[in-house]
Image (cartoon, rainbow, N blue to C red):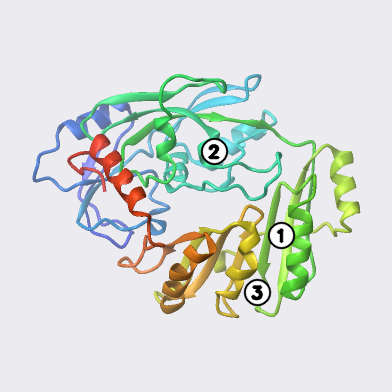
């Protein structure tokens, strides 16, 4: 274990950084905290710190990056157990060798699995049974540690389990402010026998939405499905991918008269050097997608998944207007990337949800050690 003053690459003040390689080392960090010490920000490889709200005070960053082992991999049971600091890309590579995959978003990314779950990619990319599923559904259980240094376990290493409360599912979206995850027990799937990626030509919005809905509402929808404004903002394209048996995949491509094309999301839509441009992410019911697009500036980049999750990039005034408009669409969102003072702002929360959130924090971190 090493502790040193550091200048972190993020946009908030860091007083020190500690990298821990075991549960015992993390317990020692928590046990050594004094009342006047800075609070702790739990991190993995610090690749996602610009995608979560900045702490409101200088923090001591505790990194779980050295905890990066695959502890157990059971191909027959379609489960595995990993340390929270394991990079997602490392797990994906190990699973591919065995014909397996982790069916939630973020495949191939460099960040740690603990960070991916803590940031909380919860919504799948399409509604079908073969689509990626939300982070909470993939997480079977975990071992974790409270800020007081007490370790606990929740869930189990197996798919069928009815033991206790699903405390582990609080990890998804918690941003590391409830506890530090140590081990994650994950649900896997076998790799599909065949895949086919597709993308339409540029279409007017109404035509693109009809195409999108035809695919989304099909009896066998794509495993991934997105409606996106084109790069020059002159129209929309529909992108997706079918997974499954070769005959079924070929049949769906033929039935919907799709052209097979490789595609990827343009990273330039996710990051912008201008502090005045913000990335806003959220979700609406798929039936409200047309109203969501109507609420955006006509040139704003936007992509919406088959489940209704969306990402857009907006100026500050447009971000504020969208956050205020979303409750009327039964939607929600927050500013995922932007200036430090604005990151984490979101749609107004129900007062009851706020009370529940505070009671959970009071139970798990009453001294507010984790920021």
Residue appearing at x 62%, y 20% in the figure: 77
Task: Tell whether 233 sits left or right of 173.
Answer: right
Residue 255 percent coordinates (x, y):
90, 53
Look at mark 1 in the image and give the residue it sits on: 263
Task: Residue 71: tell me if it is visible.
Answer: yes
Which secondary structure, mark 3? loop
Mark 2 secondary-structure assignment: helix
Q: Where is 242 relative to 311, above or below?
A: above
| Sequence-first tag of 3 and 1 | 3
Rendered image quadrant of residue 79:
top right
- Which mark identifies residue 231? 3
Question: Under tag 1, what secondary structure?
Answer: loop
Q: Is residue 265 visible?
A: no
Which residue is depicted at the point 68% across and 43% down? 131
**Residue pictured at 65% horizontal, 74% vertical:** 231
- Between 8 and 127, which is closer to the camera in this rendering? 127
Give the image location of residue 36, x and y in percent. 8, 46
Whether tag 3 and tag 1 are in contact, CB under 8 A, the answer is: no
> Residue under circle 2?
90
């Amino acid at each position: 274990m090493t502790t040193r003053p550091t200048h972190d690459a993020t946009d908030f003040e860091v007083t020190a950084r500690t990298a821990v390689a075991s549960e015992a080392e993390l317990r020692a960090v928590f046990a050594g905290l004094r009342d006047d010490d800075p609070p702790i920000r739990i991190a993995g490889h610090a690749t996602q710190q610009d995608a979560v709200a900045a702490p409101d005070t200088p923090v001591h960053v505790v990194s779980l990056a050295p905890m990066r082992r695959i502890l157990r991999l059971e191909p027959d049971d379609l489960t595995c157990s990993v340390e929270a600091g394991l990079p997602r890309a490392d797990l994906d590579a190990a699973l591919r060798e065995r014909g397996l995959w982790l069916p939630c978003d973020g495949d191939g990314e460099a960040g740690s699995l603990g960070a991916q779950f803590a940031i909380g990619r919860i919504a799948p990319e399409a509604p079908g049974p073969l689509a990626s599923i939300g982070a909470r559904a993939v997480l079977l259980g975990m071992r974790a540690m409270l800020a007081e240094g007490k370790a606990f376990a929740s869930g189990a290493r197996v798919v069928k389990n009815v033991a206790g409360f699903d405390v582990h599912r609080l990890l998804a979206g918690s941003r590391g402010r409830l506890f530090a995850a140590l081990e994650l027990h994950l649900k896997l799937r076998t790799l599909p026998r065949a895949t086919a990626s597709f993308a339409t030509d540029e279409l007017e919005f109404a035509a693109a939405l009809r195409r999108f809905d035809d695919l989304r509402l099909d009896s066998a929808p794509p495993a991934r499905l997105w409606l996106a404004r084109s790069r020059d903002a002159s129209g929309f394209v529909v992108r997706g991918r079918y997974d499954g048996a070769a005959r079924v995949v070929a049949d769906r491509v033929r039935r919907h008269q799709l052209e097979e094309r490789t595609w990827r999301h343009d990273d330039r839509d996710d990051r912008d050097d201008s502090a005045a441009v913000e990335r806003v992410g959220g979700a609406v019911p798929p039936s409200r997608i047309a109203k969501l697009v109507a609420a955006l500036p006509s040139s704003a980049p936007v992509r919406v998944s088959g489940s209704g999750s969306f990402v857009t990039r907006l100026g500050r005034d447009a971000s504020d207007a969208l956050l205020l408009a979303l409750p009327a669409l039964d939607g929600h969102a927050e500013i995922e990337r932007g200036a430090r003072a604005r990151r984490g702002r979101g749609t107004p929360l129900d007062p009851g949800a706020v009370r529940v959130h505070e009671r959970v924090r009071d139970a798990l971190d009453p001294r507010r050690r984790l920021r």
